[in-house]
C-alpha cells in the first residue's frame, strides 16, 4: 500500500501568516504531511513547481435555489457548488429561511437532503430566522447547535416578504446565541427609509435602476449597521454583519471592535470592484443587489479596512437571476430580483488583488479561507496544516484570464464580471484530496460534497 494518496510537490504553500516552499502528502482526504521533500510514494503526484498551494476558500454567504422576487435564484445546489469548485471554493454556506410554523432543523434537513444529492463541494447552513411566535425556536436553537448549526441570520429589512425581525426579536436571538456559543448574522438596512424613498421615486416616475441605489443610500444602511452594533456592544453578544457596503456603518463596526465588542465584518467583491455608477448603465439592473453597491468613498473605506485587517471576511452573497428576470424591472426598479453572481469569482478576484500587490497572498487566504473557517467553527477547514481536510487550490500567478459567461460554470446566463481581466488564476482544486477542477473544466461529481458539522464558539 502506498504511503500517500496524493503528493503535491515543489509548490509554495500560502497560509494566513506565511509563505514557504514545501511538499504536501495527502492520505484519506486529510493533509498527512508537510515537508521540504516528500518522496513520491503516492497514487498521484502533482508537480506544483512555480505555483502557489492554497487552502480552499469558504464562501460563507450564498443563496442557492432561493425563492425571491417572484422567482428562484438561477443556480441550483448542483450548479452553484460546481461553479464554486471551479473558482477554488471548497465549502459553501447557504441561507435557508425559516417561515412561520417551520422549525430550524426541519428547514435545514429539507435543504440538506437536496445538497447531499447535488453538492459538488462541502456545505454548511446558516438558518434565517423570521418567526418566534410559538416560542419553540428559541428552545430549538440548542439542539441545532449540537447538530453543528451554529449561526443564524436576522433580516432588518424585507417586511413585505415577512422576513424582517423587530429589535426585540433580534435582541432575544443574540442573547440566546451568546448562551449557546452561536452567532447571529445580520442584514442591516432601515426598511422605513427604503419604503419612504421608494414611494417617493415611484410617484415621481423615477423608475430606473439608479433609483434602487437612491432608495437605499449609504446612510440608510449605516443606521441599521449602527443599531445592530449597539445591541452587540450592550448585550455583549457576538454579531456578524453580512455584505458591509458603506463607510459610516463600517466605521461604527471598527470602533466597536477596537473597544472589544464581538463584532465581525464581511464584505463582498462587488462592493470592492464597482461603484453605484453601474446603476446608470444600460444594463444597470443586472447589478441590483441589496444593499446596493455604493459610492467611491465607501469603496475606498472598504479597501482600507481590507488592507488593515478591520474587515474579517470576503464572501459573495451569490444570488443570481436570469437576464429575462432582471428585465422585469426595466421600467420599475422595484420589480428587479435582487442579487448578483460571484461564487466562482471570489477567490480569483481576491488573489488577483494579491498578485497586483494590493494586499498580500496571506491576507487573501485569511479573508477567504482561514477567518471564515475560524469564525464559523469549521475546524477541519481553512488552512494548510497536518490533520486538516485536503481542500487545496493550485494557483498559477502567471496565468492571464478574462471572465466571461462562456467560461463560467454557473447556470446563470450572464455575469456582472463580464470582461474583467485577472492576472493569475486557479488551475486545480482538490476537495478532500479529490480533483474537482482542472484547467478550466469541472472534474467532480454531484453528491460528493459533505455536510460540515461546526463547533460552537467558546463561551466566556
Image (spheres, helix red, strand yellow):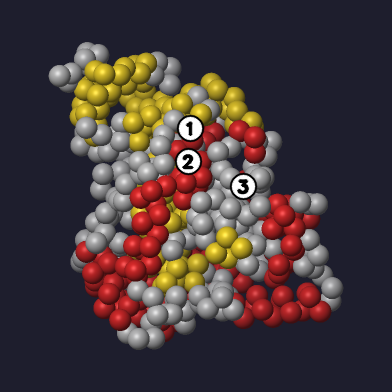
**What residue does disc 3 label?**
412
Q: Residues within 10 Å of mark 2 (few under 14, many from 20)?
A: many
In the displayed structure image, the side of residue 387 where residue 205 appears, left or right: right
Disc marking residue 442: 1
What residue appears at the point 62 percent right and 81 percent down from the top-left corner? 192
Q: Secondary structure at mark 1?
A: strand
Label 2 or label 3, whichever comes before in sequence order? 2
Mark-to-mark CA distance, 2 and 3: 12 Å
**What residue does disc 2 label?**
82
Query: In the picture shown, does residue 144 fall above or below 193?
Result: above
Q: Secondary structure at mark 2?
A: helix
Residues at marks 2 and 1 touching, judged by CB atoms closer than 8 Å:
yes
Does any portion of residue 76 appear in the rendered image?
yes
Query: Residue 394, located in which quarter of the rendered image?
Result: top left
Q: Position of residue 449 (x, y in %)?
A: 35, 44
Front residue of 414 and 201: 414
Amino acid at each position: 500500500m502506498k504511503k500517500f494518496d496524493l503528493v503535491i510537490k515543489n509548490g509554495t504553500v500560502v497560509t494566513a501568516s506565511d509563505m514557504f516552499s514545501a511538499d504536501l502528502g495527502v492520505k484519506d482526504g486529510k493533509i498527512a504531511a508537510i515537508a521540504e521533500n516528500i518522496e513520491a510514494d503516492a497514487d498521484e503526484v502533482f508537480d506544483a513547481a512555480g505555483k502557489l498551494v492554497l487552502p480552499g476558500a469558504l464562501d460563507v454567504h450564498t443563496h442557492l435555489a432561493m425563492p425571491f422576487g417572484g422567482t428562484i435564484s438561477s443556480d441550483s445546489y448542483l450548479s452553484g457548488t460546481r461553479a464554486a469548485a471551479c473558482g477554488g471554493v471548497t465549502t459553501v454556506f447557504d441561507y435557508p429561511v425559516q417561515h412561520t410554523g417551520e422549525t430550524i432543523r426541519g428547514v435545514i434537513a429539507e435543504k440538506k437532503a437536496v445538497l447531499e444529492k447535488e453538492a459538488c463541494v462541502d456545505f454548511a447552513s446558516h438558518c434565517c430566522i423570521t418567526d418566534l411566535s410559538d416560542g419553540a425556536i428559541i428552545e430549538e436553537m440548542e439542539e441545532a447547535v449540537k447538530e453543528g448549526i451554529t449561526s443564524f441570520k436576522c433580516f432588518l429589512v424585507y417586511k413585505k416578504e415577512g422576513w424582517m425581525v423587530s429589535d426585540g426579536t433580534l435582541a432575544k436571538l443574540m442573547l440566546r446565541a451568546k448562551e449557546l456559543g452561536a452567532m447571529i448574522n445580520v442584514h442591516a438596512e432601515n426598511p422605513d427609509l427604503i419604503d419612504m424613498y421608494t414611494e417617493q421615486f415611484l410617484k415621481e416616475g423615477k423608475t430606473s435602476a439608479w433609483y434602487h441605489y437612491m432608495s437605499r443610500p449609504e446612510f440608510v444602511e449605516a443606521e441599521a449597521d449602527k443599531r445592530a452594533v449597539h445591541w452587540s456592544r450592550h448585550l455583549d453578544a457576538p454579531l456578524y454583519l453580512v455584505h458591509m457596503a458603506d463607510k459610516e456603518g463600517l466605521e461604527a463596526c471598527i470602533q466597536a471592535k477596537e473597544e472589544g465588542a464581538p463584532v465581525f465584518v464581511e464584505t463582498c467583491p462587488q462592493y470592492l470592484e464597482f461603484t453605484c455608477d453601474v446603476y446608470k448603465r444600460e444594463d444597470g439592473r443586472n447589478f441590483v443587489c441589496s444593499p446596493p453597491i455604493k459610492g467611491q468613498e465607501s469603496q475606498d473605506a472598504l479597501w482600507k479596512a481590507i488592507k488593515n485587517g478591520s474587515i474579517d471576511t470576503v464572501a459573495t452573497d451569490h444570488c443570481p437571476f436570469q437576464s429575462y428576470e432582471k428585465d422585469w424591472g426595466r421600467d420599475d426598479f422595484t420589480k428587479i430580483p435582487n442579487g448578483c453572481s460571484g461564487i466562482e469569482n471570489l477567490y480569483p478576484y481576491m488573489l488577483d488583488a494579491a498578485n497586483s500587490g494590493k494586499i498580500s497572498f496571506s491576507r487573501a487566504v485569511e479573508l477567504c479561507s482561514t477567518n471564515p473557517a475560524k469564525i464559523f467553527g469549521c475546524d477541519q477547514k481553512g488552512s494548510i496544516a497536518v490533520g486538516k481536510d485536503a481542500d487545496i487550490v493550485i494557483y498559477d500567478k502567471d496565468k492571464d484570464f478574462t471572465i466571461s459567461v462562456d467560461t463560467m460554470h454557473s447556470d446563470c446566463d450572464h455575469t456582472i464580471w463580464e470582461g474583467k481581466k485577472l492576472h493569475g488564476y486557479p488551475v486545480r482544486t482538490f476537495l478532500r484530496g479529490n480533483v474537482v477542477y482542472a484547467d478550466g473544466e469541472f472534474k467532480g461529481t454531484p453528491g460528493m460534497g459533505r455536510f460540515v458539522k461546526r463547533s460552537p464558539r467558546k463561551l466566556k
